[in-house]
Image (cartoon, helix red, strand yellow):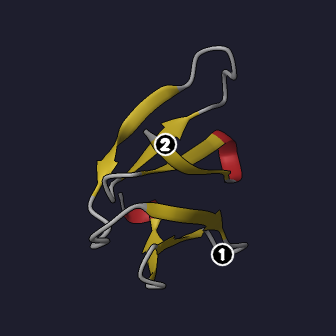
Amino acid sequence: MFSAMAFGPNGLLASGSDGGTMRLWDASAPDAPRPLGDFPTGHTGPVLSVAFGPDGLLASGDHDGIVRLCDVSLL
C-alpha cells in the first residue's frame, strides 16, 4: 500500500510504501502511469514522506525519523 507520493521533474512520480520500498513511475501520461522500477531505500519501516529537491535528489523519510537521499538520475 502506498504511504507517500510526490511528483518530480519530467513527469516522474515517486511512491513510498508501508513495506519500506520506493518506486519510480513515468507519469507523463496521467491516465496510464508506467512503473519504472523499485529501488532500495534502506528504510526498515513505512516510508511516510517523499519529496523531490530542485537539484533532482529524492528525499524520503520513515517512521524512525531517518531521512535518506537518492539521486534518481543514477537509477
What kind of residue is marked 2?
Answer: Phe
Q: At 65% from the left edge and 65% from the top edge, which residue is drawn?
A: 52
Tag shown at residue 2:
2
**Residue 21: x percent and y percent?**
33, 55
Looking at the image, tell me whether mark 2 or mark 1 is earlier in sequence order: 2
Q: Which residue is depicted at the point 52% across and 50% down?
A: 3
Point out which mark residue 66 bears.
none
Q: Which amino acid does label 1 sit on?
A: Asp
| Residue at (42, 31) in percent of width and height | 35
**Is 4 drawn above or below residue 62 in the view shown?**
above
Q: Residues within 10 Å of mark 2 (few under 14, many from 20)?
A: some
Would you name the residue on which mark 1 appears?
55
In the displayed structure image, the side of residue 38 where residue 56 appears, left or right: right
Element at label 1: loop
Query: With 3 as the anchor, is 30 left or right in this view?
Result: right
Looking at the figure, which quarter contains the C terminus? bottom left
Residue 69 falls left or right of residue 29: left
Q: What is the quadrant of the N terminus in the image?
A: top left
Residue 43: image location, x then y, percent: 32, 71
Q: Return the x and y of residue 17 as percentages of the image width and height.
A: 41, 50
In the rendered image, the vertical position of residue 27 relative to residue 12, given as above or below: above
**Label 2: element kind:** strand
Which numbered mark, 2 or 1, is in the foreground of this view? 2
**37 in relation to 71, above or below:** above
Alpha carbon separation for disc pair 2 and 1:
25 Å
Quadrant housing residue 41: bottom left
